[in-house]
Image (cartoon, rainbow, N blue to C red):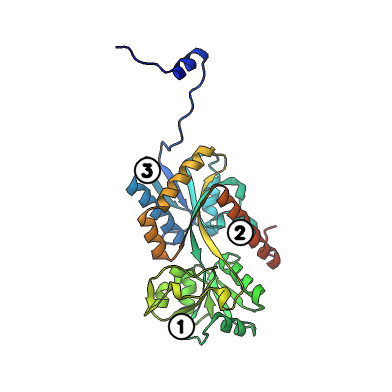
Amino acid sequence: MKKSVSIACIMVAAFGLAAPAAAFEPNRPVEFVVTAGPGGGTDIFARTIQAIIAKYELMKAPVVVTNKGSAGGAEGFVYTAGYKGDAHKLAFGTNNAYLLPVRAKVPYKAEDLTPIAALASDEFVLWVNGKADYATAADFVAKAKEGGLKIGGSQSKDVDQILTSMVNDATGAKINYIPFKSGGEAAVQLAGEHIDANVNNPSENAGQWQAGMVKPLCVFKSVKLTSEAKVVGDKGWSDIPTCKEAGIPIDNYSMPRTVWLPAGVEPDVVQFYADVLRKVSETPEWAKYLADTSQSPAYLSGDDFKAAIEMDGAAVSEVLKREGWLAN
């Protein structure tokens, strides 16, 4: 029985033409580099994606998660950037991927990483102690204009302090910023009445709110949170007013959950992982993760993701320049 031979194969044989390369797929273990310590938001973000990929068999290669969170996440980004062209190293972080080189002397540049996708948006809420007599964000701002109030947050010159600077600039308030090691520590300090406020993400203060130790005044988002889950009695996330309507003229401030490859990878590598992550974002498990952590869905890739990076980087750089926090 004769075997059929395609015209394309004949042409390749006759003229020595190379057959088109197959689309990329990882052929060895893929390392998910978490730019934070175990148990934190970025770690849960990466491990949730790892579990969903495994459950739905979204790629054949196994995934190994490693934590490299020293220096505010710089350790993980430096490590990933050091594998230029390697299609098997993915860094998981936030907007710190491109903001760290702007505000700190770190041994990598944003250009040393290739953006793949953003999958979620972690929101910021203005929290005060549960016993505080502030009824609205406007009440808090009025007191803050007198000076003396202390707001706590995670790290120095990072997202929490940047937002505090934006609040001061937008309202004329004189809030003093106190840095802690984490949002969890800032939550404990607020619950214990050692500081006057924090701007923690919803999940970082959820337990204290449920216990009545803290209360939210507003969310830094253009629209209210959509989760209908109730936290205290009949009050839940969707009942928190936006800060703009509550007395702080800041329309939107959030922290994207992002994924990166080293520089120098081929476009089909980026597309492969962007497609995998898009499929992850469409699963019920991902919807549950977003609900459990009170984050907003925000899948972005390609030019949309690059545009968002440019916009966020410009806005934050303006604050860093005003405060004198730009790295020299």
Under mark 3, the amino acid is Pro
Under mark 1, the amino acid is Gly
> Dot 1: what SS?
loop
Question: In the rendered image, which residue does mark 1 sit on?
Answer: 130
Alpha carbon separation for disc pair 1 and 3: 46 Å
Question: In the rendered image, which residue does mark 2 sit on?
Answer: 312
In this rendering, which labeled residue sits more in front, label 1 or label 3? 1
Up the image or down, 35 lies above or below 30; here it is below
- How many residues crowd mark 2 within 10 Å: few (<14), some (14–19), many (20+)? some
* Percent of width and height locating residue 15: 52, 14
Query: Which one is nearer the viewer's eye here, 305 or 81?
Result: 305
Residue at coordinates 59% horizontally, 74% vertically from top-left?
177
Question: In the rendered image, which residue does mark 3 sit on?
Answer: 62
- Of labels 1 and 2, earlier in sequence is 1
Up the image or down, 273 lies above or below 131; here it is above
Is residue 185 shown to the viewer in this render? Answer: yes
Answer with the quarter of the image where residue 104 lies.
Answer: bottom right
Disc 1 to disc 3: CB gap under 8 Å? no
Under mark 2, the amino acid is Asp
Is residue 105 shown to the viewer in this render? Answer: no
Image quadrant where one finds the C terminus:
bottom right
- Of labels 1 and 3, earlier in sequence is 3
Alpha carbon separation for disc pair 3 and 2: 33 Å
Alpha carbon separation for disc pair 1 and 2: 32 Å
- How many residues crowd mark 1 within 10 Å: few (<14), some (14–19), many (20+)? some
Answer with the quarter of the image where residue 139 lies.
Answer: bottom right
Q: Residue furthest bottom?
A: 133
